[in-house]
Amino acid sequence: MEYYDQVIIGGGLSGLAAGIRLARFGSKVLILEKHAIPGGLNSYYHRQGRLLETGLHAMTNYAAPGVKHAPLNRLLRQLSISRKQFQFCQQLRSTILFSGNRSLTFSNDPAQLAGEVARLFPDSAERFLDLVELVRNHDPFQPRPWSSARARLAELLGDPLLINMLLWPVMIYGNSNEHDMDFDQFVIMFSALYLEGMFRPAGSIKEFLDLLVNHFRELGGELRLRAPVVRFAVDGGRVNRVVLESGEEIGAGQVISTAGYPATLNFMGQADPVEVASHHGRMSFVEIINILPASARAELCYADNTIIFYNFDEPFDYRCPDAAVNLNCGVICFPDNFHDLPERAEMQLRVTHPANYQIWRGYSPEEYRDQKSRWAEQSAAKVAEIVGNYRPKVLYQDVFTPLTVERFTGKAAGAIYGSPLKVRDGRTPLQNLFVAGTDQGYLGIVGAMLSGVTMVNQHIFSEK
Amino acid sequence: MNRQEIRDVILEIIQDIDEDSSLENLKDDQPLRDQLDLDSMDFLDIVMELRKRYKLQIPEVDYPELASLASCVNYLEPRLQEV
């Protein structure tokens, strides 16, 4: 039987980051990924000769080179990856659009959002600046019980419309709670999104993942693809061996699971189904990827935006919809709209809406196909009201549902942001088993990677 | 290793951790944290690198001993004598 100092379950961004961190200091470490391609929630696939990205619309936490304490630069240092290996492209601008044509535009210059708030909410301008100051000085990583972001924002900002407009992008960037979110999580994402800002690497997510995987392997780490884990062999409160679907057993000194808390409880066996179900998130989404000729840009509105976060529900509520899809709110992303990206012949338009997993799961295979095309059609009609009619120009379209997410990422109930109950310290009932990634609670790509790094630093490297 | 060799090793490790650090004007008796803008995650890297290279275990209570270049050398000298 093969033995490893550490076995990591999941070759997504948190698993790769944890693996690099361990391999860098000489551990014998193995990453087990169930799919043929690494990346987890942020991966890619090929259709008709095109590489299509999943997950990544924009990364948050932009930082200029040399800003040492910024999460992005700190992360790269921890992984011993030179920032010079990347060209990072910043967003153009993004818009938060609510009914009545009320909009706030923001960019990676926080002064722009402050100016917009002052224009649309003159009575709240000062209070908004106070909130920014509070966010800059608040340490969200101190262990604290869950506290309501909505309650704090009601005190700090007052205006319900302003609160909702600021919350919508923050929530859809990673909130697994319905209706409200933890104030510390709000602070993390407010800073990541509005103060640091959005960017993407000039290359595709494939190149980004290839770089991480190559770095991991050069450091001596091993990655096995198509290697799904089914259970742990547990002895004396510890994971002794990790058992693969093939029946193969692998010995492990310590295990880091990025498979999500519900899946991790199932690996442990004898998990109480009620407890497992309590960790199922309810926030899932449909996403429609459209490929258009680049010439279509000239005829579309908002085509100089990177992302449009729209909501026409009154009042706005972040929740699992009663229907299969809620078209009244969504995210429209132009993933080609970042500074310094090369010109391409084609462009993408991606649309994301909240969706109801249970309804999608209830469809027969035929209904499922019909509903997919029906909702894609209705989504396009809705989005056309904002950006103009792009439907006749579509060269290729693909639709993900909550079931697609569940199948390809292993996220229970297709909940991309995982369990509403986060395991902030990464500990589990087993002494040598830790969780990292989505269910540990750092959000976004940079957050997921920092989660992998932090769990290794805290639980594996620290000498007690 | 002698004191000079230990000092060189520490500088080499810091340069590996942060390629942008400029080490020329470093003052041996001043805190590294302030001079190089390092944080606790970077300090952990120094500890881990010493562990990897010399099998040297530095317990968390001793981390303050690594505050400045001079205190690093003082702390490591008896521990790296045989290396």
Image (tube, rainbow, N blue to C red):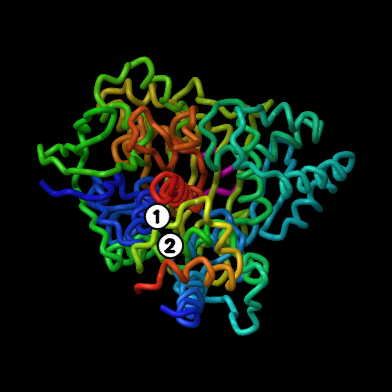
Residue A34, picture quadrant: top left
Q: Which residue is mark 1?
A: A17
Q: Is residue A384 magenta?
A: yes
Tag 1's secondary structure? helix
The chain identifier of the residue carrying mark 2 reads A
Which amino acid type is shown beneath numbered disc 2?
A: Leu
Quadrant of the rendering where the C terminus of chain A is positioned: top left
**Residue at mark 2 shares a chain with residue at mark 1:** yes
| Residue picked out by circle 2 | A79
Question: How much space separates mark 2 and mark 1, taking CA atoms?
Answer: 7 Å
Q: Name the residue located 49 percent from the left edge and 74 percent from the top edge.
A: B10
Residue A52 on image: x %, y %: 36, 55
Is residue A403 placed above or below A290 in the rendered structure? above
Tell me the quarter of the picture where residue A299 sits: bottom right
Q: What secondary structure is marked by label 2? A: loop
Q: Is residue A153 above or below residue A456?
A: above
Q: Mark 1 and mark 2 in contact (Cβ < 8 Å)?
A: yes
* Residue stretch in magenta: A380-390
Residue A457: where, in percent of width, then height? 45, 50
* Residue B18 shown left or right of residue A273 in the figure: right
Residue type, label 1: Ala
